[in-house]
Amino acid sequence: MKRIAIIAAAGLAALSCGGGGMKGDAMGTFDAAEVIVSCEVPGRIVEFGISEGDVLEKGQSAGLIDTVQLALQKRQLLSSIEALKNSRPDMDSQLAPYREQLAKSQHERARVESLLQADAATQKQLDDLVSAIIVAEKQLAAQETAISSGLASIDAQLEALGVQVEQLDDQLSRCRIVSPIAGTVLIRAGRRTRPAGKASDEGGRPERHTP
């Protein structure tokens, strides 16, 4: 893992005054705090274009780890998410035939009840329709439960895949080597990996920055 060391210098000054005249005596003390900036994920360095003497701003990119595999994983997850979304059943369209059958049975029951009052239908006809309505209601409820369960399962899978995408986004953000402070590069370290058969960049020691 390639590392960058950064030195931040902070000045501390004291001024003393004598009595009878103005006499100033300045004294400066500088403390150097070393900061190590390292690649947060393992991998091949594909970008490391800084040099000794370069001035970096806080948050400026200093290098990059190969993100191809992570990007491919994210693309695959996004494809899976899209496929799951497309597989979501349309509850209204799937329940429509059951609702239609139930409505027809209820309408027929009302018609037979009227006929029964006029002695134009039998009690058995009405009983058969009542039984058919009970069956239709149970079928509708069972289908609605099955579809709701399927939707809940898909939603759970989508949530899990979304978390994986967030994790990959975090890993991708950690592939960039970023300077945490503004400073000047004193020592350059690390090497950018080249394709096989080509010489790699110069190696070295940790990079040091001073503001």
Image (cartoon, rainbow, N blue to C red):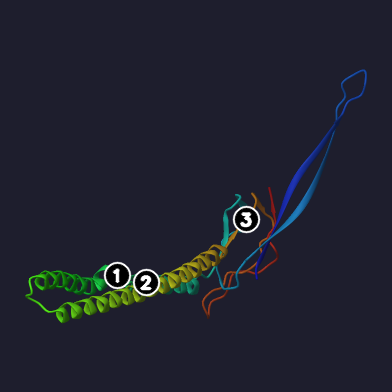
Q: Which residue: 61% across, 53% down?
A: 54
Residue kind at label 1, given as amino acid type? Met
Q: Earlier in the sequence, mark 3 or mark 1?
A: 1
Instruction: Label 2: state its secondary structure.
Output: helix
Residue kind at label 2, given as amino acid type? Ser
Q: Earlier in the sequence, mark 2 or mark 3?
A: 2
Residue 179, labelled with which disc? 3
Instruction: Label 1: state its secondary structure.
Output: helix
Q: CA distance from mark 3 to mark 1?
A: 52 Å
Q: Residues within 10 Å of mark 1 (few under 14, many from 20)?
A: some
Q: CA distance from mark 1 to mark 2?
A: 8 Å
Residue 76, labelled with which disc? none
* Residue at the spot of label 1: 91
* Residue 151 shows up from this direction: yes
* Residue 47 shows up from this direction: no
* Residue at the spot of label 2: 148
**Residue 129, quarter of picture:** bottom left
Q: Establish if 107 lies above or below 209.
A: below
Q: Earlier in the sequence, mark 1 or mark 2?
A: 1
Q: CA distance from mark 2 to mark 3?
A: 50 Å
Lateral position of residue 153 relative to residue 178, left or right: left
Q: Position of residue 122 (x, y in %)?
A: 12, 79
